Structure formats: C-alpha cells, structure tokens
Amino acid sequence: MKLTFSDVMLVRNGKTVLHPLNLELTQHRIGFIGANGSGKSTLARMAGGLIRPTSGSVSVCGHDTAKNEKDVRRMTGFVFQNPDSQIVYPIVEEDLAFGLKERGFPKAEHATRISGVLERLGISHLRQRLAHELSGGERQLVALAGVLVTEPELLILDEPTTLLDLRHSRRIATHVAALPQTVIFVTHHLDLLAHFDRVIVLDEGRVIADGDPEKAIGLYEKAMM
Amino acid sequence: MINGLYRPGTSLIHRLPAGLKLIILAVTCTIVFFLEGWSLAVVLALTVVLYLVARFSVQTLYSQLRPALPFILLLALFQVFAASWVEAIETILRFSSLILLAALLSLTTSPAALSDALLAAMRPFKRFGIPAERIALAMTLAIRFIPVITQAAEDVREAQRARGGRDRFFRSAGPTLIRTLRLADEIAEALEARGLGLSDDETPAKRTAALE
C-alpha cells in the first residue's frame, strides 16, 4: 500500500488549513498527531478521498483521490470519533449489512461476513441489539465492525478512542494492532502509537516532525510546551 | 411517535411481513376515518388487544399515546364547542386508534424491513425519477436518529440546569438544533465513507443533492 501526497494544499474560507506538503507513506502502521486544529484529521480525510485538496494531488495505490474517487473509497474504511454518526441503522446486524449492500457485496455473503467480523471483535452477542442501547465503547466496536466487514485495504481511524474509557480504548487498539490492513491512526492518545512504524506530527497545517514514534512524539511534546 | 421505536420480539405481529402490515395499516386508517359512533370504540378495543397479542404492556401502549394526548384533547375540546359531545368523543377514539396502530407498526417492524417494504412499493415509480432507495434510507435514518437527538436535547437541558438556568423548551431548542445540524454533517460524511452509492452509478454531486 502506497499513499502519496504531492504538493498538497488546502484552503478553506480564505484560511490555509494545510500548507503545501509532500509525503510518501508506505509503512504498515502510521500515526498522525497534533494539537486540535493542526490539520491531522483533514490530512487523514484526504487520504480516504473524503476531502479534495485545493491544489496538488493525493493518490492511494496509484489511484488519484480526485479522478478515481470511487476506487479510493472502495479500498478505504473510515472509523470516526463519534460512533453515533457512523452507525446508520438501528440494529447492529442491519447496520453491518448497510456497508456490504452499498459496496455491492452479494447478499448471500452478508450473514457469514457479519458473523465473522462480530466474532473476531468479540461482540457476537450484540448482533440483534439496538445501537442506541449500547455503551459508548460497544458502539465504537460496532462502528469498527461496520467498516471491517467490507474488508478495506486501508483503514483510517480518526480519534476513535477519544470518547472511550481506558478499557475500551485498549480493546480498540488491540484489535487494530492485529489487523492485516494498512492503518492510519489519528489520535491524542500517544501511548497507543508506541509500536507504530511511523508517526507524523502536524502543527498549524504543517508537518513539524516525521519519524519513529519515540522521536516524533518527543518532538511533539517539546513543541507543545 | 418518539416512543414508537422498534422492540424486537417473536409475536405473531412481529413475524408478519412488513409490506403486509403497511397495507393493513393504510386500509384500516382509511376505514377508521369514515367510521362513526360505537364502532370507533370497538376499533380502539381491538387495537388494545393487538398490543396484548404483540406482548406489550398497557404502559407501553400509554407511552405511545402520551405525547399526542394534549393535541387530541385540544381537538376534542374544539369539537365540543363547534359540534357536539358525541363528536368530541369520536375524535378522541379515532385519533387514539390511528396513533396506536401506527406506533404498533414501528414497534413490531424492524426499520430495515420497513425500508425494504417501502422500497418495493416505490419501485414502480422509479421510472418517473423518484429516488426510491434514497427515500427509504432517509426514513431509516430518521428512525435511527430519534434517540440520538432526544439524548442531545436532554444533554443541552441538563447543561442549562447545571448552570442554574430554568428548564425551558425554547431556550434549549437553539443549542439542540445546532448539535443536530453538526450531527447531520457528520452523518453525511460517514455515509459517504461507508460507501453510499458505490454500487450504483450516481455522481457525488447528484448524491449530495438527493440527500439535501
């Protein structure tokens, strides 16, 4: 999996959200960190084709996110901070089927795929439950299941643990660590990135550090003093 | 209808096909509109029986009716002055039955099944450009987000109470609306991320227009 940001820049309402940047991401586990409003979530959304740059280009495995939007979206899965906005059907099983249906998976495969992912995440017992009755942690696991069930090649997680307690944060991190997919993890929970291959630090729309977790997090902490 | 959310179950009414239930509801409601006198009391009594068959308590039944009661009573009061006592009682019976029957449908039918049934009913109109899939999805989303938005409203009221403000509906309406609009943005983004429209040949612009 190769992600390339070439001379990417983003301007919104006259304000520069991302200053021109070039990045080539080939690692398996990549973390984006930075203060609120630093541009880390925007960068992650660009990688998934949800936001287009004002200038420059982003490509995922050679597919330009602007020209081949559907191809990029098909290979990418996104988990957001708030599972409430991500779970669109009231019952867990129906919600998981939604992604499969929209991505064109044959209906005959739905039940097996749903059972498989729920079992892998240890939440088979939630299959028939109403989403709004679940705890925040359970809902985030359901949101993750809703994405993993479609087996994306690239998984982007935007602060998925911010609203969770320690137990569920660790549970999400453990599941993510075991995934075969390439992962981009945007977070404020720096300890979750300890075993990552690469960490990119953003500040006011610029990359201020880029490297292994120890070095990058050290520079981030110093910059935030 | 706020309390009329699906409650999974195995009763006979739960197991009936959603499309059949929709047709029965439409036909019954039309008939109820033309009924008069004691037959309306029979309809309401039968509706109560249906709730028992679906294994719901009288409390559940009452909670479906409660939000609409002030409006029904107001309407009945108007009838007392404009028409007669008999018509006022008929109004109460008629509207209570209609609301309870509609709520019974949403209590016993999963939103996905309901949306599939609506989709099947709307399919013939697709050739006239009716976006059947999108209408069905919008309906499902509306049902799914009732508890989320109710919770958002409750959070706003709680925050206002914590800051010493009085609990007034109009004062919390603004912040609740802002939260809801923000949530709508997040949902639109999440729908796109989860693959909305990837299996058909819509363009993103068309999709955005349909959702708006």
Image (cartoon, helix red, strand yellow):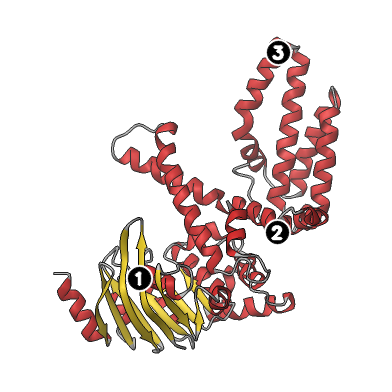
The 10 Å Cα crowd at callout 2, few under 14, some 14 to 19, many 20 or more, is some
Q: Chain of mark 3?
A: B
**Whole-Å distance between the Cαs marked 3 and 1?**
69 Å
Disc 2: which residue: B133
Element under disc 2: helix
Q: Chain of mark 1?
A: A
Q: Which mark is residue A9?
A: 1
Rendered location of residue B185, percent (x, y): 48, 55
Q: Are marks 3 and 2 in contact (CB under 8 Å)?
A: no
Q: Chain of mark 2?
A: B
Disc 3: which residue: B80
The 10 Å Cα crowd at callout 3, few under 14, some 14 to 19, many 20 or more, is some
What amino acid is at disc 3? Val
**Whole-Å distance between the Cαs marked 3 and 2?**
45 Å
Of label 3 and label 2, which has the lower sequence position?
Answer: 3
Q: Which mark is residue B46?
A: none
